[in-house]
Amino acid sequence: MASVFTKIVNGEIPSYKVACDDRYYAFLDINPLAEGHTLVIPKHEVNYIFDLDPEEYSELWLFARKVATAIKMAVPCKRIGVAVMGMEVPHAHIHLVPLNSEADLDFRKKKLVLTPDEFGKIAEKISKVFETL
Ligand code: AMP
């Protein structure tokens, strides 16, 4: 069965798109730790990130680097934190989280609740910056 992220890539489930090319896709996490919390995925579904072939693995991280640059420019924060877990969704993905302190990357903390309008505005802001890079 296709993962929820494959359904997003195929447009069967909506997402707040931040960036994409023909092989990789970035969109806002629906339960964000911070405004601008983004997930970066290969469109090709592979469960475990360390099972990606070396080329796809490297390209995914290079794509994530560009997305992180765009988030950093669009969202006020000190740094972009990175996490890889995959405990919930079995489709390789990288979390990019705007940080102002170490505590901002604590996945046990209460997630932000944003309106569709707020999600849409953040995604648009990041994607506009991404297009200039
Ligand atoms: P994990 O697999 O543990 O790295 O966590 C999966 C992440 O995907 C969680 O932070 C979820 O909030 C996020 N997530 C799950 N479904 C969606 C969705 N439909 N759109 C955006 N983010 C999602």
Image (spheres, rainbow, N blue to C red):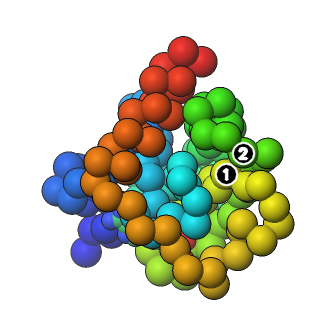
Neighbor class of circle 1 (other Cα within 10 Å; few <14, some 14-19, many 20+) is many
Residue depicted at x 58% and y 59%? 34
Which of these two is toward me, 25 or 106?
106
N-term-proximal mark, 1 vs 2: 2
Q: Name the residue that disc number 2 marks.
A: 77
**Residue identifier under label 1:** 98
At a point 60% along the width and 18% down the height, the residue shown is 133
Residue 97 seen? yes
Give x and y (percent) for residue 84: 66, 66
In the drawing, does residue 70 fall left or right of residue 131? right
Q: How many marks?
A: 2
Image-based side of 63 in relation to 3, left or right? right
Asked if disc 1 and disc 2 are in contact, CB closer than 8 Å, the reply is yes
Q: Is residue 103 above or below residue 38?
A: below
Badge 2 element: loop
| Residue shown at 63% from the left, 84% from the top | 108
Label ID, residue 55: none
- Seen in the picture, residue 58 relative to 13 is either above or below; the reply is above
Residue in view at x 73 percent, y 55 percent: 99
Q: Position of residue 111 (x, y in %)?
A: 52, 74
Front-most of 16 and 122?
122
Residue 51, how many percent across, how many down?
Answer: 61, 64
Quadrant location of residue 7?
A: bottom left
Q: Identify the secondary structure beneath mark 1.
A: strand
Mark 1 to mark 2: distance in Å? 6 Å
Which quarter of the rendered image does ligand 1 occupy?
bottom left
Q: Quadrant of residue 2?
A: bottom left
The outermost residue toward the right is 102
| Quadrant, the N terminus | bottom left
Q: Is residue 47 visible?
A: no
Label 2 crowd bin: few (<14), some (14–19), many (20+), radius 10 Å: some
Disc 1 residue type? Pro
